[in-house]
Image (cartoon, rainbow, N blue to C red):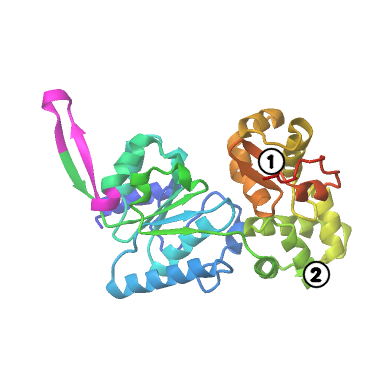
Amino acid sequence: MTDHRRKKAGAAGENGTSSLQPKPVVTDEEPQFINLRPKSLAEYIGQPEVVETLSIAIEAARQRKEPLDHILFHAPPGLGKTTLAHIIAQEMGVNITVTSGPALEKGGDLLGILTHLEDGDILFIDEIHRLPRVVEEFLYPAMEDFAVDFIFDKGVHARSHRYRLARFVLIGATTRAGLLSAPLRERFGIFRDLDFYSEDELVRIAKRSASLLNIQINTDGAYEIARRSRGTPRIVNRLLKRVRDFAQVRGDGTIRKKTVQEALELEGVDEKGLTMLDRKFLKAIIDFYRGGPAGIEAIAATLQEESDTLVDVVEPYLLKVGFLTRTSAGRKVTEKAYRHFGLPVQQGLFKKPKP
């Protein structure tokens, strides 16, 4: 790399868009949370099939001394998409550049990043389904041919020039894979869904994070946090910190089951992990739409929330635990949800129609 290029790339790194250090770089999170991230696949808890797939792909790429295929991760928020991207960079010993779909407003924004990448470097685009169409079209030749095309002038004087790029690896993350265009989706060599974590996996994550944060926690306390964490590691770590504060101020500093119950009652998180927004969502369908079906836009208007927030953040877990179903006519609250709230099930609402 020339001194001029090093200077440009270094400046990009200071702006949070690129890095020349081999270690993962995250600039938008508190230091304690960064420390909680696993640094290797061996440390990573959960998602065994995904980890095995990545381990094989990384080892094969190392043996051939080639970059990885482009990778797409699909999962609700907080399940480890960003963490895996940084682990892959660490395992491959390459630099990682982090950005997001909404941040790339023009083709020039993406072009500036692509031209600073070295062979094997990783470009991680979070919420890749939100890329503007004009930016997405720049990615097609970049992913497939490792080149971008410039158009000079207009009309009869228009000229095209192809600029060769280093052979980089694109890792995309999305919460809504269905919104990705087919041409973009088909250019990824590895496509993996991340599932919600089991309670046992979340307990292991809670204990590991507690150890890193120097928190005293017993097994019952770890299980109580795990069962209220919606199957999501990010929520485990968030709740752990809130319970830590409660134990420090109202207890003896040790996290036990009762400590967790009292702390999370103040946080508005119930025994199933439902938050205030979850309960408002379900109650709105029950109270205003007689249990459903109700359209997501109507529910969003009732709650005065963004429909994307409900679809990406609220619905996945409610569907997972069986409190909500989606039908062609809209969302419906299940009998299980009525029982959770201690409400009588509406007469005939869940009866199967006679043949």
Note whether 117 is above or below 291 in the view shown.
below
Residue nearest the viewer, comparing 130 with 10? 130
User: Where's the N terminus, which quadrant?
Assistant: bottom left
Residue 239 in picture, x, y percent from top left: 73, 56
Residue 155 located within the stretch drawn in magenta? yes
| Picture coordinates of residue 9, whole percent (x, y) | 34, 50
Q: Residue at x 63, y 60 (%)?
A: 233
Magenta segment includes 270: no
Is label 1 in a helix, a strand or a loop? Answer: strand
Mark 2 neighbour density, 10 Å: few (under 14) some (14–19) many (20 or more): some
| Quadrant position of residue 260 | bottom right
Which quadrant is the C terminus positioned in?
Answer: top right
Q: Tell me if residue 218 can be seen.
A: no
**Residue ID for mark 1:** 332
Left or right of 306, for residue 49: left
Please state which amino acid type lies under the numbered disc 2: Asp
Q: Residue at x 57, y 63 (%)?
A: 37
Distance, label 1 to label 2, CA atoms, is 34 Å
Q: Which mark is residue 220?
A: 2
Q: Which residues are magenta?
A: 142-160
For residue 151, what is the image quadrant? top left
